[in-house]
Structures are given as C-alpha cells and as structure tokens.
Image (tube, rainbow, N blue to C red):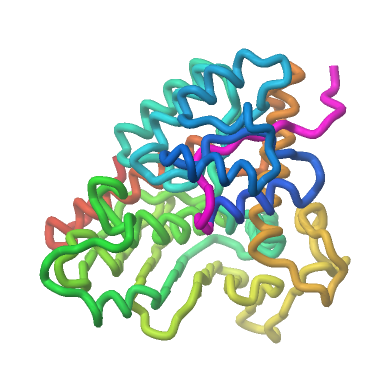
Amino acid sequence: MAVKRKLRMGMVGGGRGAFIGGVHRMASALDGQIELVAGAFSSDPEKGRLSGEDFFLDPERVYSSYAEMAEKEAAREDGIDFVSIVVRNDLHAEVAIAFLEAGINVICEKPLSYSLEEGKRIAEVVEKTGKVFALTHNYTGYPMVKEARSMVQAGKLGRILKIVAEYPQGYAISSLKEASEDGSISNWRMDPSVSGISNCIGDIGTHAENLAKYITGLEIEELAAELTAFIPGQELDSDGNMLIRFKGGAKGILFASQISTGDENNLNIRIYGTEASLEWHQEHPNELTVKYADAPREIHRRGNSYNGEVCGQNTRLPFGHPEAFIEAFANVYLSAAEAIRDEIEGNYPRESGYDFPGIEEGLEGMAFIEAAVASSKNNAAWTKLG
C-alpha cells in the first residue's frame, strides 16, 4: 500500500544551540514530505525537554535517551519512519544500531562512525535488518554537482586523468593564535576520545573525498598523506595534504585545512579528462565551468533547460534565483525519503537504485581517514585503503 502521508521523523541530538541539527530540520521539512514528531535532543534532559518545546512536539515523544526513544517509537502504531542522527562521532554507531535493530530506518551525519571497525559493525546491522541507511554528504545534493556527474557518466570528459579536490577553511586560525600549551580543548572535533583519529580530514577531508568519488565514480587505491596539528596542545590534525592514486590510473591531489586564513567554506573540485575538464566551487554552487583544449570555456548555470534531467529534478527555483546549502541537504533527504517509502511499502531496494550516499560511501570515508592517518605517521608513505 502506498504511503500517502508525510514521513514521520525522529532526531537524536541537534537540540538548542546545535548548528547542524537546525540544518537537518530545515532541509527535511523543505519539500513538505517529512515531519519531525519525536526526539532525544540532548544528554541533558532539561535541555532536551526545552528543545522539544521549541519544536512544538508532544511532550510524550520528547525522550531523555535515544535507547528509550528507539524502544517506545518502535512500539507505537504511529511511530517514526526514520531517525536523523546528529550526535558526535563517538555515538554514531551505538545510536544507529539501536534504531536499526528496532526496525527503524536511519539518516546519519558524516563521518559514518568513530572508527572503521565501528562502521563495519553498522554495515553488518544494515545488511541484517534490510533497513535504509543514508549518510548526509550534503554536497552531493547540489544540482550542478549532479550535472557534473551526468557529464562524466555520459563520457563528455573522455578518460579521467586527474582530480584536484580542495577544502580550505580558516576558522581555526583563531585557535592557533590563542591556544596555550595546556592542551585544553574547546571544540569536540579536536578531542580524539570523541572525534576519532582525525579532526580536519575526518570532518571536511571526507567531503572532498566523497565529492570526487560521487562525480567521477573512481575509487581511491592508495594515498600518500601529511597531516599536521598546527594548534599547540592538540593531538589531531588541523591541516592535511595528500597525493592520490585512483583505481584505473587517474591521479589526484587533495587537501583539507582549517587554518587557511581568510577562507570560509571553500570546497572546490577540478576534474581533468582527455576531452574536457570540469570545475565547481561550493561558494558559487549555481555555476559549473566546462573547459576544452580547442574551444572557449562554458559556464553552465543551474535552472536552465540546457542542463540534464537529473540536474533539473534536483532544482526547485527558476534560473537567477540562487539555491544553495539547505536545498542541497534537502535533496539528500528527498532521495532518502524515496527509499524509506519503498521500504515501508515492501519494495526496497528498487532495481534502479537511489541517488544518496549510503553505508558503502560511509565505509569508504572511514577507510580514507584511517589510510591518511597511517600514511602520515609513516612519513607520508603510500598506503592502500583498507
């Protein structure tokens, strides 16, 4: 039977003061297909209760723990169809597994988990339960990123020779200037007991890695990385640079940085093929540059009829009306919602597949992090992905 209603969403984490929780709530609600009905928004019960009031939820469905939420929502006739997990890295695995085993689909923030080992545990439960698992690599949701992918798939670039992916930010430069040698940690992403073995590469480097894979379809075979903890007293990296060898022979350069003074969120990618090349910048997401050896370069803009079908399907506004970060997130949610509806109806997975990152992309990201850290510890030695 077709699901002729809004999907019911729960959220773990993302309460008052949490940036990413608000992004997920706005994105999930954008197309009118999803409704937030329950949550365990904080480990602090009072903060969680107040967050539930902020979102006008039934107090009975605002829980003091994710375990209680999974159990009680699974038992309700009108229980949640999926949970959105926006907690810190060290909790991803236990929260995801609890809901999957309760029979509830999952949409999870990246990176997948605290470690590759934990990620593999999640993957085992996803396979066992047959539930939908989506990972919010939100940059895959931009229409012009999808247009770039379609061009590569159609062979317009020819054979891919080289990929350059960059993600410089400058927000941590203030920490570098103000940091003392006492090792105090103000950002949980810099705490290895919470974040895992990497800060910068785990947080934003995985976005650059995932973007390269999403557009080109190429998998990393091995890499040589140098990671640096520039902030005094901190163990985890705030900057990373690496050379990459892709399966099939393409070469790559990837760097991610949080101490690039003056940069805001400057994710960009350049893909060079034998027939043409592509260039896309996240801070100017409505444009895609196509370059040729023997013809003028082209600027393709979102919302125009000359773009491909997939780009159009992920575009909400006419040309000249910019779409950006929230809409890209919403495209991931919208694609995941298709799968969740199929799962509820007993038609999951469908043969044609779905256009959102999932458990495989999550495992690739964790393997990428571990290989980068291992390479850096071995004087940037070439290291294969596990």
Classify 142 as above or below 69: below
Residue 352 visible in the picture: yes
Residue displayed at 62% across by 65% down? 157
Left or right, residue 76 beside residue 4: left
**Location of residue 329 in the rendering, given as x and y in whole percent from the top left corner:** 64, 54
Q: Which quadrant is the N terminus positioned in? A: top right
Dominant SS of magenta comes to loop
State which quadrant residue 107 falls in: top right
Q: Is residue 228 left or right of residue 64?
A: left
Q: Which quadrant holds the C terminus?
A: top left
- Asked if residue 43 lies left or right of residue 269, the reply is left
Q: Position of residue 221 (x, y in %)?
A: 35, 49
Looking at this view, is 301 or 183 the one in front?
183
Q: Is residue 85 visible?
A: no
Q: Please report the residue visible at 68 percent of the width from the left and 52 percent of the height from the top.
A: 27
Q: Nearer the viewer, residue 240 or 259?
A: 259
**Residue 17 part of the magenta segment:** yes
Whether 330 is among the magenta residues is no
Viewer-nearest residue: 273 or 323: 323
Q: Is residue 143 above or below residue 110?
A: below
Residue at position x 14%, y 56% in the image: 377
What range is drawn magenta here?
A: 1-19
Is residue 90 depicted above or below 158 in this figure? above
Find residue 16 and report its horizontal and vertical position in percent.
Answer: 53, 52
